[in-house]
Image (cartoon, grey):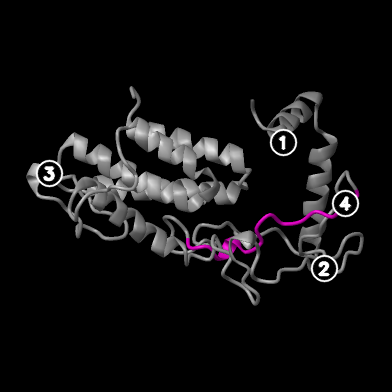
Amino acid sequence: MTDTVAVAWNQAALEAVRQTGLGPPMVARALYVLHASMYDAWAAHDDLAFGSRLGDLLRRPPAGRTQAAKQEAASFAAHLALADLFPTEATAFAKLMSDLGFDPDAPGPAGSPGAVGVQAARAVLAFRHGDGANQLGDLGPEPRGLAAAYQDWTGYRPASPLARLLDPNRWQPLPTPDGMEQRFLAPHWGLVAPFALQAGWELRPAGPRLHPGRSYLFQAEEVLADSAGLTDGHKAIAEYWADGPG
């Protein structure tokens, strides 16, 4: 393997995303879990770094802070994290471990790089299993396990149903090309524990102007003017990003 283990595991994670079709919010969370797990395993073998979950409790003695130990610990942490996040892709993750020269079922005794990596990942996973994302499908009035992974557990319903505007200040679904109704991918995601912020709304800007009022009408006129002024170039750019680059 010529790539660093971090790159190798990133590539494995992205391939798992392609294979499973996980939604964008869930992908962002999964990549954070992977990186936090690898970082915490690496931090235990660094002179100064602190892990995100266990601080310096896993710090290894100076003699054990080698590059090889960091790679092994990060690999065991990454393997456990990804197997938890993408259980259907476990075979691919086990193969990568083998390619890197590690046995995923043999992390070693307590204090070894592999065991430290497993311990670091378990701490991250234990916290994230309860972060509100519903990864395990165990939230809501009727938990249904992994079959309901990441599904909304709040009972969200749009304030205005399709084709009937009841509240102009709230989101209203539009019809889709196949005649169905737009749906939020993850209406509960605002309740997921953030990765860096204290709260998800900490840096959120003020909302749009509300109905009724002159400022609301002015805002609507601005939107109409912007839409009417779109050039073919603007539309091509919008279509490009809607379809996704590449």
Which residue type carries mark 4? Pro
Q: First in sequence: mark 3 or mark 1?
A: 3
Which residue type carries mark 2? Asp
Give the residues drawn in magenta, as a range.
Answer: 179-193
Q: First in sequence: mark 1 or mark 4?
A: 4
- Say which of marks 3 and 1 sits in front: 3
Instruction: Measure how far apart labels 1 and 4 are at the Cα level.
Output: 17 Å
- Density class for disc 3 (Cα within 10 Å; few <14, some 14-19, many ≥20) is some
Please tell me which residue is depicted at 72% across the width and 33% down the height of the picture.
Answer: 243
Q: Determine which residue is flagged by label 2.
A: 167
> Visible in this render: residue 108?
yes
Q: First in sequence: mark 1 or mark 2?
A: 2
In terms of secondary structure, where does tag 4 sit?
loop
Instruction: Measure how far apart labels 3 and 1 are at the Cα level.
Output: 49 Å
- Say which of marks 4 and 3 sits in front: 3
Q: Give me the disc on residue 175.
A: 4
Q: In this view, does 48 lie to the left or right of 243?
A: left
Instruction: Measure how far apart labels 1 and 2 are at the Cα level.
Output: 27 Å
* Label 1–label 4 contact, CB within 8 A: no
Please tell me which residue is depicted at 20% across the width and 57% down the height of the picture.
Answer: 56
- Density class for disc 2 (Cα within 10 Å; few <14, some 14-19, many ≥20) is few
Residue 172 lies in the magenta-colored region = no
Is 235 situated above or below 111?
A: above
Q: In which quarter of the image is the N terminus?
A: top left
Q: First in sequence: mark 2 or mark 4?
A: 2
